[in-house]
């Protein structure tokens, strides 16, 4: 949310405001009050919503009160509101998509299709608001009669009137934004806001009591229907015989009365209006001197980088603000607005900034803008919103949660000192490095031995074999060669003899 919602968290009786005279004296309503819609305040003051989003929300919320809900097409909604279809679609897009700030979706859309595949208009309902959520009542007829920007201004004034909060032109300008062009995202200036207030007052939806509010401010009074002063007709008026319907011989009498409706339908098409070009001549009217229309504001307050509340919060560092870049000033303004919307008061932010500016030397040598965002405006303390650097802001006493955290830390430190942890065993020295392994060459394979005789010769040797010749073969050629020559039956009995291989049979 933006800096504009700071006054939303203030109680209704926090700022006394004198009672202003009511505009109902000497005035009469044009028509009845009509239906009203409960609009969430976040739609009115949120910079992420276009002005047209508020008009579309009010119309959908009013139509959704019917038993069948809101089933109007976008073109029909645009016709009701006197907008073009593209403007209505952009406003509806902001409402049907999740909000980029807190992820809420204000309009829930359900697509509908007949069995044959032919599509129907979507069914739309509004989000159910929370019980503690701030809201403002806005007449449905105001959305039909006023432009989106004037409707947003009307809703802001209506909320301030309900909460008894005095307003200045700068306060209202700080809650209205440019949404297109080079100035997108910036606040409206005082002169632009004053022109809008004058235009809204001419419609009869509000009455401006000049200099009758608190401390010389204007007092604003909203109406559920446009009102205008009653002009008393003179007692006797001369008949000049050329007026509209003076008698039956002159004038122009209407044959059919055009009844008033709460929804003017434009037969030529959906929405649309005639834009009036502002004079951009180089010479002022009635003057011979040449005027320049390219002059731009030179200070942050004129450019709209900081709102009035941000200027008051930054009072301790006001002399450093001219050196801060406009981009950082807008980020600082957004941060101040976020904290004010969360419930932090202006006095709390100013006191925090004063204490930190007086206790540090860093900002005097570095970038003051970055110091404000990274240290000066950052809240320190526990998770309780009322905690301010370990102290409860409303009472000045020490925060109980911070005290519990500190006591727990002291208890853990005392327990660690009383029962110190077991000493960590000293690591043993690493084992000496093993020498590299030396690989020996593989021994050559044994020779094939004596060439074996043929089968006939082996039969003759085995027939003439004696124990002496077998033992001699074992000694000279080994067990395998002797077995191949004389066979196992003759060689095995000699293998058990310790004289040859120690009784180890092969």
Image (cartoon, rainbow, N blue to C red):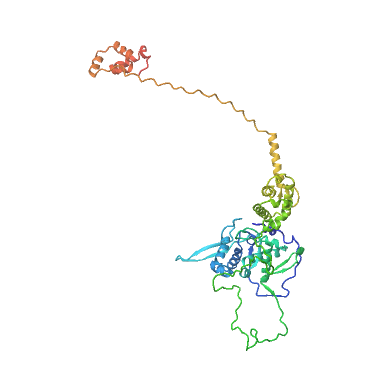
Compared with 468, 115 (above or below) is below
**In the orientation shown, which residue stands out farthest toward the left?**
456
All told, the count of numbered labels is 0
Image quarter of residue 5: bottom right
Question: Does residue 487 show up?
Answer: no
Task: Choose between 460 and 347: the one closer to the eye.
Answer: 347
Residue 465: % across, % down: 26, 13
Q: Quadrant of the N terminus?
A: bottom right
Q: Using residue 342 as the reference point, say whether residue 435 is left or right of it.
A: left
Compared with 257, 49 (above or below) is above
Q: Residue at x 30, y 10 (%)?
A: 468
Compared with 41, 361 (above or below) is above
Image quarter of residue 405: top right
Question: Does residue 147 show up?
Answer: yes
Residue 34: % across, % down: 64, 72
**In the orientation shown, which residue stands out farthest toward the front?**
288
Residue 120: % across, % down: 50, 66
């Amino acid at each position: 949310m933006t800096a504009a919602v700071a006054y939303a968290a203030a109680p209704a009786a926090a700022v006394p405001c004198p009672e202003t005279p009511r505009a109902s004296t000497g005035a009469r309503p044009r028509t009845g009050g009509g239906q009203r819609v409960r609009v969430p305040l976040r739609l009115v003051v949120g910079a992420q919503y276009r002005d047209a989003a508020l008009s579309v929300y009010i119309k959908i919320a009013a139509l959704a009160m019917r038993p069948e809900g809101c089933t109007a097409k976008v073109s029909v909604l645009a016709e009701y509101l006197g907008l073009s279809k593209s403007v209505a679609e952009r406003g509806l897009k902001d409402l049907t998509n999740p909000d980029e700030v807190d992820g809420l979706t204000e309009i829930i859309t359900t697509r509908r299709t007949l069995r044959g595949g032919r599509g129907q208009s979507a069914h739309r309902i509004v989000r159910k608001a929370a019980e503690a959520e701030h809201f403002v009542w806005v007449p449905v007829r105001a959305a039909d009669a006023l432009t989106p920007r004037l409707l947003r201004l009307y809703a802001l004034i209506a909320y301030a009137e309900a909460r008894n909060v005095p307003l200045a032109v700068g306060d209202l300008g700080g809650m209205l934004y440019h949404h297109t062009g080079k100035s997108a995202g910036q606040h409206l200036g005082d002169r632009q806001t004053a022109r809008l207030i004058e235009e809204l007052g001419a419609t009869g939806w509000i009455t401006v009591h000049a200099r009758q509010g608190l401390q010389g401010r204007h007092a604003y009074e909203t109406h559920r229907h446009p009102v205008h002063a009653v002009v008393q007709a003179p007692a006797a008026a001369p008949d000049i015989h050329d007026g509209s319907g003076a008698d039956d011989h002159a004038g122009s009498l209407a044959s059919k009365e055009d009844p008033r409706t709460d929804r003017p339908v434009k037969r030529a098409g959906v929405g649309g209006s005639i834009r009036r070009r502002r004079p951009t001549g180089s010479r002022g009217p009635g003057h011979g001197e040449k005027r320049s229309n390219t002059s731009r504001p030179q200070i942050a307050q004129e450019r709209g980088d900081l709102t009035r509340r941000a200027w008051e919060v930054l009072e301790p560092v006001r002399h450093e603000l001219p050196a801060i870049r406009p981009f950082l000033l807008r980020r600082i303004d957004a941060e101040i607005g976020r904290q004010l919307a969360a419930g932090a008061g202006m006095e709390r932010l100013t006191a925090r900034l004063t204490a930190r500016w007086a206790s540090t030397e860093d900002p005097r040598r570095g970038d003051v803008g970055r110091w404000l965002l990274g240290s000066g405006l950052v809240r320190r303390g526990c998770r309780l919103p009322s905690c301010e650097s370990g102290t409860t802001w409303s009472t000045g006493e020490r925060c109980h949660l911070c005290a519990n955290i500190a006591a727990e830390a002291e208890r853990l430190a005392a327990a660690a000192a009383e029962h110190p942890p077991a000493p960590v065993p000293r690591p043993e020295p690493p084992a000496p490095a093993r020498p590299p392994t030396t690989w020996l060459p593989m021994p050559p394979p044994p020779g094939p031995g004596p060439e074996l005789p043929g089968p006939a010769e082996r039969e003759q040797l085995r027939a003439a074999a004696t124990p002496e010749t077998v033992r001699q073969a074992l000694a000279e050629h080994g067990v395998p060669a002797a077995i191949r020559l004389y066979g196992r039956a003759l060689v095995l009995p000699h293998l058990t003899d310790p004289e040859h291989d120690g009784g180890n049979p092969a």
